[in-house]
């Protein structure tokens, strides 16, 4: 028997998780969705949503019933042509996912990244010195969070020096494209042709430096670990997922510290809390707010809630990371808690393969800031950057106090 409706009554909601109102302040809507039930049907899109930690965690770790190959956004790739060839990492399931993933994992492992750490520390110190030389007040997004990843990551991948201004718009579009065809997508689409073309060019072997991540992906193809047809798409994953995400992550840490001076002081007293500050900030903000899965079979996605095959399920990572069933005082930025187990990087076999890069970029930059200023606070209300998937800012004026 094939089910056409959930076996258990699921509450419905008319909340639109891609509306401007939601994107401007998702927290009250996420609270409502969490309290409605473990699974809610979003009437507007005909999809299911999960906002509680337990169900989101369960979905993330059940790749057999909940596939990624039908797309991890709202669009169902079975019914709709994707806007670009699907990612071999993000939009694939085992067994096709495994070889590309293994290559990415080895490439971006903490051990391999240690080779970059010394240079990135120097780059972070230089950047913070330059910013502070212009004054104690600056913009934490446009002067810092956007500048640092663009200074270190494209060089690490080994792409050319020209055209790098395409990276942020491309990532922004890719993350918008996980949502519906709202104005965030349709307004940017006319500009994307040359951007997509440029990204494709950067992924080709002849355009990559011979010592970067890109060249190492092509070398993995030479060794037979992946095919030569797969190599450029894996380079594309780095360029898609590696810039806007880390910009948003760095901004999240700065925002958390600028708005919690007591936690800044705790970090000053004990720098070993720096990795925790990063995890706690990404838990609290959840730069990537949500991804989808698609049921491959009749699936119990919460106790007693069985969905038919072929249904889209939205996992609200940001809501799960603030679920009071899992976290004590979930809305607090608190360096005395252990935030491990958060789902800001997902969980299970798709868990962010680039997370060590994000962690390294953020911690070396905040470390450089701690070395150079006594305190940091917001100088004005930050300006939000609306995106269908990312929660971040376009601007964040801050003022720092000099070391005494
Ligand atoms: C990809 C990718 C992976 C994670 C996130 C993402 C745009 C893209 O493999 O291209 O967001």
Image: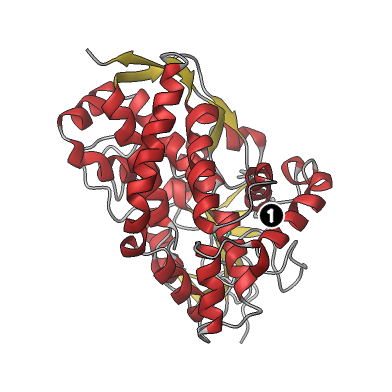
**Which residue, as the protein is rendered here, is positioned at the far right?**
190
Q: Can residue 119 be seen in this view?
A: yes
* Residue nearest the observer in this picture, 69 or 266: 266
Q: Quadrant of the C terminus?
A: top left
Tell me what residue is drawn at x 44 percent, y 45 percent.
Answer: 286
Q: Is residue 125 above or below residue 265?
A: below
* Residue nearest the observer in this picture, 243 or 72: 243
Percent coordinates x, y for residue 21 in the rendering: 62, 33
Q: Is residue 281 visible?
A: no
58 left or right of 86 in image? left
Mark 1: secondary structure: loop
Percent coordinates x, y for residue 115 in the rendering: 34, 57
Q: In which quarter of the image is the N terminus?
A: bottom right
Disc 1 target residue: 45
- Mark 1 CB in 8 Å range of ligand 1? no
Q: How many labels does the image show?
A: 1
Tell me what residue is drawn at x 69 percent, y 50 percent.
Answer: 44
């Amino acid at each position: 028997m094939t089910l056409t409706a959930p076996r258990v009554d699921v509450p419905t909601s008319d909340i639109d998780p891609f509306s401007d109102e939601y994107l401007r302040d998702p927290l009250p809507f996420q609270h409502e969705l969490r309290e409605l039930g473990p699974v809610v049907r979003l009437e507007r899109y005909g999809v299911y949503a999960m906002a509680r930690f337990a169900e989101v965690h369960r979905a993330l770790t059940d790749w057999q019933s909940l596939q990624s190959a039908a797309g991890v956004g709202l669009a169902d790739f079975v019914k709709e042509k994707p806007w670009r060839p699907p990612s071999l990492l993000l939009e694939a399931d085992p067994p096709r996912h495994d070889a590309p993933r293994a290559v990415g994992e080895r490439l971006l492992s903490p051990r391999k990244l240690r080779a970059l750490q010394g240079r990135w520390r120097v780059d972070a110190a230089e950047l913070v010195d330059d910013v502070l030389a212009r004054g104690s007040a600056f913009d934490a997004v446009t002067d810092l969070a956007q500048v640092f990843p663009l200074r270190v990551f494209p060089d690490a991948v080994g792409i050319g020096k020209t055209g790098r201004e395409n990276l942020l718009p491309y990532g922004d579009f890719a993350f918008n494209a996980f949502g519906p065809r709202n104005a965030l997508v349709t307004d940017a689409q006319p500009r994307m042709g040359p951007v997509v073309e440029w990204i494709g060019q950067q992924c080709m072997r002849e355009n990559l430096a011979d010592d970067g991540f890109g060249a190492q992906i092509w070398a993995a193809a030479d060794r037979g670990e992946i095919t030569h047809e797969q190599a450029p798409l894996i380079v594309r994953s780095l360029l898609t997922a590696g810039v806007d995400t880390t910009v948003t992550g760095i901004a999240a840490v700065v925002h958390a510290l600028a708005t919690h001076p007591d936690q800044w002081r705790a970090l000053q007293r004990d720098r070993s809390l720096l990795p925790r500050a990063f995890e706690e900030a990404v838990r609290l903000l959840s730069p990537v707010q949500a991804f989808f899965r698609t049921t491959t079979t009749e699936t119990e996605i919460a106790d007693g809630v069985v969905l038919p095959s072929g249904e889209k399920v939205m996992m609200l990572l940001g809501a799960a990371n603030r679920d009071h069933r899992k976290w004590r005082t979930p809305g607090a930025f608190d360096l005395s808690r252990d935030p491990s187990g958060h789902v800001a990087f997902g969980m299970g076999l798709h868990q962010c393969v680039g997370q060590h890069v994000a962690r390294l970029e953020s911690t070396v930059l905040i470390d450089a800031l701690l070395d150079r200023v006594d305190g940091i606070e917001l100088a004005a209300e930050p300006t939000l950057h609306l995106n269908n998937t990312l929660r971040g800012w376009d601007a964040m004026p801050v003022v720092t106090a000099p070391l005494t």
